Amino acid sequence: MRSTGHRLWLLYPTTPTFGFGFYTAANNRAGAALDVLSRFDSAADAAYPNWPVRYPGPGQTGLPTTGNPITLAWRYFGPTPIAGTISLTDGSGNAIPFTATTALPVGHKGIEIRPMQNLPPNARIDVSVSGSYDGQPFSYAWSFTTGN
């Protein structure tokens, strides 16, 4: 889940099935593969009502304090969103420094918010993002909670 490119495929809502393979050779060298494209159904994207997919999700608990960017993802073959105002704070309203980009890996369309420091443990984190997608304004605000 730390890799934005992999995560966005794992959370892609119109792909119902994924394949995974793992192999260990006699010399202890290993390899793994994740098949996310065999069942990718881009035709179903237009009817999916819950874009963008957010991670962490609203109300999610026990998140690691390090290494996981916050993402909003729209359909793969859609336009790139335009980010406007973004806010990341702890439950007490203290700002958490971050970087943000819409230049996501492998052609994904969305916004990545990457905290520049570890998130506080056992804390509510509030996220607010506004901007526009496909010419329409949007505004999303949600919270998640970190663990130890």
Image (cartoon, rainbow, N blue to C red):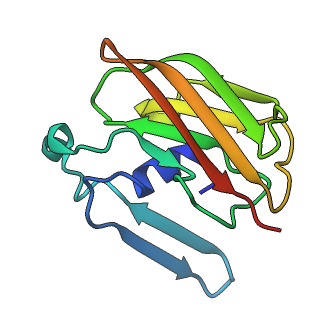
Residue 125, x across and y down, in percent: 71, 47
Determine whether 16 is above or below 132 in the image: below
Determine whether 101 is above or below 112 in the image: above
- Toward the top, the furthest residue is 135
Going 42% across and 55% down the picture, which residue do you hit? 11
Residue 103 seen from this side: no
Which quadrant would residue 96 be assigned to in this image?
Answer: top right
In the drawing, does residue 50 fall left or right of residue 143? left
Residue 91, x across and y down, in percent: 77, 46
Which quarter of the image is occupied by the C terminus?
bottom right
Going 67% across and 42% down the picture, which residue do you hit? 126
Residue 41, x across and y down, in percent: 18, 50
Nearest the camera: 58 or 45? 58
Determine whether 57 is above or below 25 in the image: above
Which quarter of the image is occupied by the N terminus?
bottom right
Going 68% across and 28% down the picture, which residue do you hit? 87
Which quadrant would residue 46 be assigned to in this image?
Answer: top left
Residue 14 seen from this side: yes
In the drawing, does residue 58 fall left or right of residue 97? left
In the drawing, does residue 66 fall left or right of residue 84? right
